[in-house]
Amino acid sequence: MKAEYYNVIGVMSGTSLDGVDLAHIQFKIENEKWSFEIIESETVSYSLDWINSLKTAVHFSTNELDDLNQKYTQLLATTISNFIKNHNIENLDAVCSHGHTVLHQPEKGFTLQIGNLPEISSLINQTVVCDFRVQDVQLGGQGAPLVPIGDRILFYEYDYCMNLGGFSNVSFEENGKRIAFDISPVNTVLNFYANQLGLDYDDKGNISRTGICNENLLNELNVLDFYQKKHPKSLGIEFVIDSVLPIIESYKITTADKLRTFAEHVATQIAAALPTKKGNFFITGGGAYNDFLIARIQYYLPEMKIIIPEKKILEFKEALIFALLGVLKLRGEINVLSSVTGAKMDHSTGNIYIQK
């Protein structure tokens, strides 16, 4: 008999490097319908040293990556333990942790999320479900995006579910199948240019708003090969470093103009990616706070009703859904859809580490 109630923590670190998201979540299953409550949530920021390490890890040697993995697992364990202690959380069924992606090359059969070493369970003295992407890549999939099964189970009332984080990704139902894919970089690029101005991010898109869209740059970005590919498809930081930033840097324009042009690029790619331009459009992730970007998306999708949820869901949706992936793994149920990732089959992914 499977449990109908789960008390778990979801842990997520995204490419935008704003920190480790932690959410204490309780799930209930009644008549095969899932409901959830986010009890506590918190984002623990990275130190400047960690931001620099995670930004440059794509260039590390194998030995340097191994060392980083060990240190990051320790960091994650301390972060999770402090969250449990500070919020007096007891009787957990599991901690469900994504780790942090440092390499993502599914076309080469490879993806690496650090912070998923087996010792994490003994370090936090909890059962841990983690490392959700590797198996999918081994099965010929993209290893991403993994959130769409959560969209189907928890947010089924929306026509489109989008996350605006380091990258944008969308999921929706089409002919009885869940379809999902990455669309374009978002905060990986916008934050890069905000950083050049001494800012962590472009607050509400206020700097982008003052810039002038460079049509030549916009056109050059819009014809990148990735945008012509059919789904399933996914993006990693390598795409930003190798393909996007060199194009933007070739233009001698102000940082405000770069931000403005890239915001326009994001909005045009999102509008182009949606098969129908009407319905309810549920947007989460840090990019949902970028008022200017949201306005540009609405401009290209005038008949779409954009819905931005309350703060806990907006900021912690990915932590919530990785918690769900962990629970599905504990239940021995499918938590990755081949229609989304392109893997050979639907499957139940993740490693379960029992505390010793």
Image (cartoon, grey):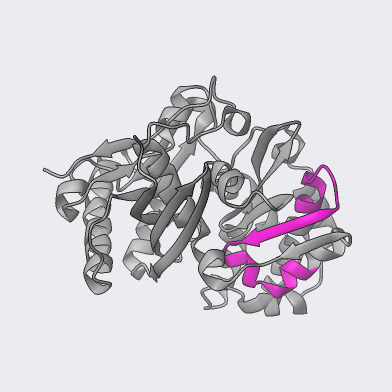
| Quarter assignment of residue 290 | bottom right
In this image, 324 relative to 202: left or right?
A: left
Span shown in magenta = 268-295
Position of residue 124 relative to residue 45, above or below, is above
Q: Residue at x 47, y 31 (%)?
A: 334
69 or 273, which is in the foreground?
Answer: 273
Does residue 125 appear left or right of residue 328 in this picture? left
User: Residue at 82% of width from left, 47% of height from top?
Assistant: 272
**Magenta run includes residue 240:** no
In the rendered image, residue 24, in percent from the top left (x then y), is placed at 37, 62
Q: Residue furthest top?
A: 344
**292 drawn magenta:** yes
Q: Is residue 261 left or right of residue 332?
A: right
- Residue 49 drawn at (x, y percent): 32, 65
Is residue 8 shown above or below 298? above
* Residue 184 locus on image (x, y percent): 67, 49
User: What residue appears at the point 54 percent right and 39 percent down from the top-left corner?
Assistant: 144
